[in-house]
Image (spheres, helix red, strand yellow):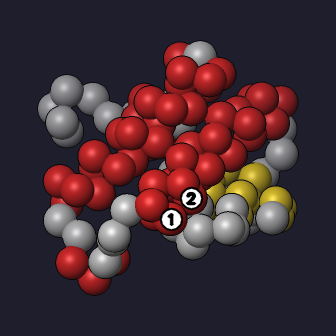
Amino acid sequence: MISLGDPELLKQSEGYAGNGSIPGYIQLAIVPDEKNLAKLNACAAHEFHHNVLFYNAKWNFMNVSVGQYLAVEGLAESFAESMFGKEFIGPWVTNVDNREA
């Protein structure tokens, strides 16, 4: 499902975000502009990776460590990058500087 996003709510993620944690469903929200529309496929691939992983792995969302969560996000973003290229990496990766890492 793709829905129009609220510009204020999606400001931190530069106007788009997704959820693929429920196997069989992907939700994307976007504030459509030229930059975001170009990244929509990579965002969908990222969420698709979550879909496949959470279908195949035994995962209890109530017992997830920060390290596990970061690993899952990194795997999904690496998958999207391998399909669409580094220029389509999401701001949740590119906006982290070395001081925050």
Q: CA distance from mark 1 to mark 2?
A: 6 Å
Q: Is residue 74 left or right of residue 92?
A: left
Residue under the image location 27 percent in, 29 percent down: 97
Q: Residues within 10 Å of mark 1 (few under 14, many from 20)?
A: some
Mark 2: which secondary structure? helix
Q: Quadrant of residue 99?
A: top left
Q: Position of residue 76 (x, y in %)?
A: 46, 42
Residue closer to the observer: 75 or 91: 75
Mark 1 vs mark 2: in front: 1
Residue closer to the observer: 34 or 23: 23
Whether residue 3 appears in this view of the structure is yes
Residue closer to the observer: 59 or 77: 59
Placement of the C terminus among the 4 image quadrants: top left
Mark 1: which secondary structure? helix
What kind of residue is marked 2?
Asn
Q: Position of residue 67 (x, y in %)?
A: 17, 53
- Residue at numbered disc 2: 51
Q: Quadrant of residue 32?
A: top right
Residue under the image location 28 percent in, 46 percent down: 71
Q: Is residue 22 left or right of residue 67?
A: right
- Which numbered disc covers residue 55? 1
What kind of residue is marked 1?
Tyr
Please identify the residue farthest to the bottom as the structure is shown. Answer: 62
Whether residue 36 appears in this view of the structure is no
Q: Quadrant of residue 84?
A: top right
Picture layout, residue 45 above or below residue 81: below
Q: Are marks 1 and 2 in contact (CB under 8 Å)?
A: yes
Q: Residues within 10 Å of mark 2 (few under 14, many from 20)?
A: many
